[in-house]
Amino acid sequence: MTIQDATSSIPSKRSSSALSMAPRKKVSSSDPLVFHGRHFGRTVFALCNYPSLLTNGILRLEQMEDTPLEDFPAEEQREHRVFEQLLDSYPGLLERLKGGSEEEILHVGELVGKGAAGARGDDTKTLKSAILDWISPKGEAIQPPLHRNSKIDRGFNHELTGSLLCPAGLDWNDPQTKENLRSGEMLVCGDQWPIFLYAHHIYDPEDPWSSLLRSRLLTCAYKHVFTSPSSVDKEPKATRSGNARLHGMNSVTIASIAYIATQVRFALSSSSVFSRTDTTTDSETFYHSLLDLLEDPEESQEVDELLTWWNRQIFPASSAARRPISANSALSKIRQRRIALKRAAVLDNIHS
DNA sequence: CTCCACACGGGTGCATGACT
DNA sequence: AGTCATGCACCCGTGTGGAG
């Protein structure tokens, strides 16, 4: 399915409403860019300010005439790769930015950002309740009970969510550790990964890759978001298309795994508001720390194996014939070349 | 105070399988 | 073939709390 196919099916029920004489362009929800932003946030990059991503991206293209991308700070390099992926994933976007004013660039960023934020909010909302079904002991109720619509008792306040959120390498069963985590005396940062990331919640310090990002909790949440809520624990009752199909997605992405892990971590926590800048939940650091590992070229073999494993879990029908795209593959070379050509086109425009 | 980002309840229309 | 029921993604309005 192409982008055009996907976006042409967006309901246009509100397209005729309220495009009034606002001084600034209205961020219309029915714009295909919002729809695209939903998927882009879930699968490529979730936590960023899209208007500045675009302005910085255009600006950086100009700077890159003198300074190669490798000389920029790591954070900017990542932002730029996201920028290029956005250009690459939406036909016509480059031309739109080329021909657009500064305000138009900001407007495009707002549309994409609105989609990404909307999808994220919808996901946190539905996962908040659904996650309790996945962490309950088989056939039993959670003791003491956890509320579906309140998170106040979650996090380290509860035995079950506490044990799942306990950083790998620490022993939740140690009373002193437990007390320190509960009281907040021991502060958990985003780069201290919780044990729920590991299959069967077992971390092996001798082989840290062995079960990382292979837990059932993660695959449940992934299916809930990407295939459909009903596909999690039973044969999916074939109904309306799920997100993956709606967006023509037939393999997992690195960022989508990090996104789901971040959502699960937040759902288990006691925080009621998802905020990038919130230092206690530290979701942004967590998300970035996962991306740091998964995008590291030195880890590409393990990451390829991980993606193969994930594709078998999520897309069993189509994963047999597919090999993961490694960092050095021919396809990636082709992409790099295409991006270079686009960059040249943008520079042309800036200078003309 | 305003502004902003977010949570949350609830509504809408679409796609699909089941049924007549 | 037509109709119905249901699961689903998406969207809106409103309330809230934090930052400036």
Image: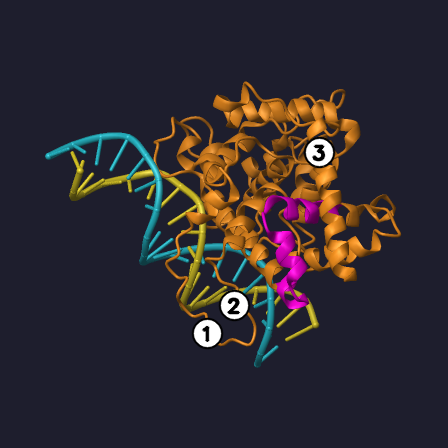
Chain colours: A orange, B cyan, C yellow
Front one among A304 and A178: A304
Q: From mark 1 to mark 3, how far is it between C-alphas? A: 44 Å
Q: Earlier in the sequence, mark 3 or mark 2?
A: 2
Residue A97 sits inside the magenta stretch: yes
The magenta stretch spans which residues? A78-106
Reading the chain from its start, which is encountered first: label 1 or label 2? 1
SS type, badge 2: loop
x%, y% of residue A297? 78, 31
The residue at which mark 3 appears reads as: A334
* In this rendering, position of residue A89 left or right of residue A59: left
For image coordinates 73% across by 23% down, the residue present is A301
Can residue A185 be spotted in the picture? no
Q: Residues within 10 Å of mark 1 (few under 14, many from 20)?
A: few
Dot 1 and dot 2 residues touching (CB under 8 Å): yes
Q: In the image, which disc is placed on residue A26?
A: 2
Q: Chain of mark 3?
A: A
Q: The residue marked by circle 1 belongs to what chain?
A: A
Residue A112 numbered tag: none
Q: Position of residue A154 (x, y in %)?
A: 54, 44
In front: label 3 or label 2: 3
Circle on res. A20: 1
Labels 1, 2: one chain:
yes
Q: Position of residue A187 (x, y in %)?
A: 72, 46
Which quadrant holds residue A207? top right
Q: Would residue A69 be visible to someone looking at this image?
A: yes
- Discs 1, 3: same chain: yes
Furthest-front residue in view? A352
- Tell me the residue at 66%/66% (across/down): A101
Q: Tag 2: residue type?
A: Lys
| Quarter of the rendering occupied by the C terminus of chain A | bottom right
